[in-house]
Image (tube, helix red, strand yellow):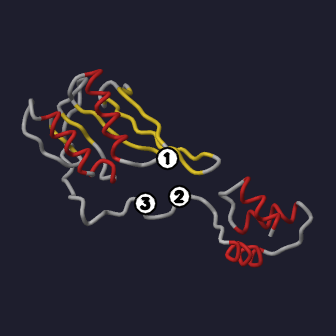
Amino acid sequence: MHHIDRLHLEHPFMGSRMLRDQLNRAGVDVGRKHVGTLMKRMGIEALYRKPNTSKKSPSNKIYPYLLRGLVINRANQVWALDTTYIPMSKGFVYLTAVVDWASRKVLAAKVAITLESCHAVDVLQKAFNLHGRPEIVNTDQGSQFTAQEFVECVKDASSAWTDVVLGEIMYL
């Protein structure tokens, strides 16, 4: 158990199979099932992104996709926001970026250790301040983009422009 604890602290992503292999290489003859039993007894498990991270929340409204068939041919016509996971030795960091579709230019980006809507709001506000307002903001249905805080940010930005149709597309 001491060896498992030490290996788990150094490599928290390792499951019972990888731990077994490491222990066997170190001269400890043990099987995968026994390692799994010891891990359960110790209350440890492999650290990795679990499935269903994109499950829809019943409280978040689902918006239609409105870009289908649209020709995107000029800067500031469509901006895209997305967040990607960057694996680290202990957990993940999240990179949120705003990209102009026509020019493929990264307009703003932010790295954070949590996946919260405030980071999406920050990066969008930074892009607004640096580059003005686009005609369309395109996002996926991630929780940070369907959160009330983010939706309000887009609504506030669009109040001086045109009506807003929220969704995977937000017209400004």
SS for tag 1?
strand
Compared to residue 71, the image places residue 89 above or below, namely: below
- Contact between marks 3 and 2 (CB within 8 A): the answer is yes
Amino acid on which disc 1 is placed: Tyr
Residue 45: x and y in percent read 64, 67
Query: Quadrant of the rendered structure where residue 156 is?
Result: top left
Q: Would you name the residue on which mark 3 appears?
A: 53
Q: Residues within 10 Å of mark 2 (few under 14, many from 20)?
A: few
Amino acid on which disc 3 is placed: Thr
Q: Which mark is residue 36?
A: none
Q: Would you name the residue on which mark 2 appears?
A: 49
Compared to residue 149, the image places residue 104 above or below, namely: above
Residue 59: x and y in percent read 24, 63
Q: Would you name the residue on which mark 1 appears?
A: 85
Query: Quadrant of the rendered structure where residue 60 is?
Result: bottom left
Q: Which residue sits at x=89%, y=68%?
A: 28
- Contact between marks 2 and 1 (CB within 8 A): the answer is yes
SS for tag 2?
loop
- Between marks 3 and 1, how big is the CA–CA gap? 11 Å
